[in-house]
Image: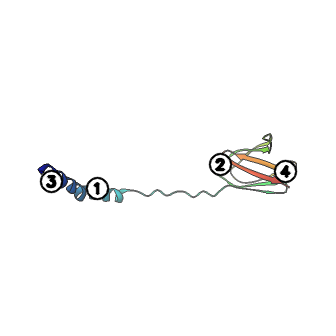
Amino acid sequence: MKRFYWTTLCILLFLCGFGIDGIYAQDQNRKEVMEEVVPETKIKVTENRLVIENLPKDGVLEIFSIMGVKVYTRKIKAGTNEYQLDLPKGYYIIRIGDLVKKILLK
């Protein structure tokens, strides 16, 4: 029975003593990490013009037909860009790195 009391007393001292203080000290020393807000990349199509806004880095623009055939490729720069597309009307898939979007040319 002495062993049970001794173990219980040690656990209580550990939790109430330096254990909680240690946790509190760790919380005070923790530095908050500020996340940088990056604007979302937007792709807009009006008639035969393709506008890409807020592209974070240079990349390669690839346009595929709805059947999966690559019909257009071009290197593009970061920021906002506008391109003239001479493609027939229809649905296309645009890929810039990891960004993929379906568009309609009217």
Q: Mark 1 points at which residue?
A: 22
> How far apart are the two marked residues, 1 and 4, measured between alpha carbons?
64 Å
Q: Name the residue under label 2.
A: 57
* Residue drawn at 82 percent across, 54 percent down: 49
Three-letter code for the amino acid on which mark 1 is drawn: Gly
Q: Mark 4 points at which residue?
A: 90
Answer few, some or many: residues within 10 Å of disc 3's Cα (few below 14, many 20 plus, some between 14 and 19).
few
Return the x and y of residue 5 as percentages of the image width and height.
15, 53
Return the x and y of residue 20 as percentages of the image width and height.
28, 58
> How far apart are the two marked residues, 2 and 1, measured between alpha carbons?
44 Å
How many discs appear?
Answer: 4
> How far apart are the two marked residues, 2 and 4, measured between alpha carbons?
28 Å
Answer few, some or many: residues within 10 Å of disc 1's Cα (few below 14, many 20 plus, some between 14 and 19).
few
Q: Residue furthest left?
A: 2
Q: In which quarter of the image is residue 36?
A: bottom right
Q: Name the residue under label 3.
A: 5
N-term-proximal mark, 3 vs 2: 3
66, above or below 81, in the image: above
What kind of element bears circle 1? helix
Answer few, some or many: residues within 10 Å of disc 4's Cα (few below 14, many 20 plus, some between 14 and 19).
few
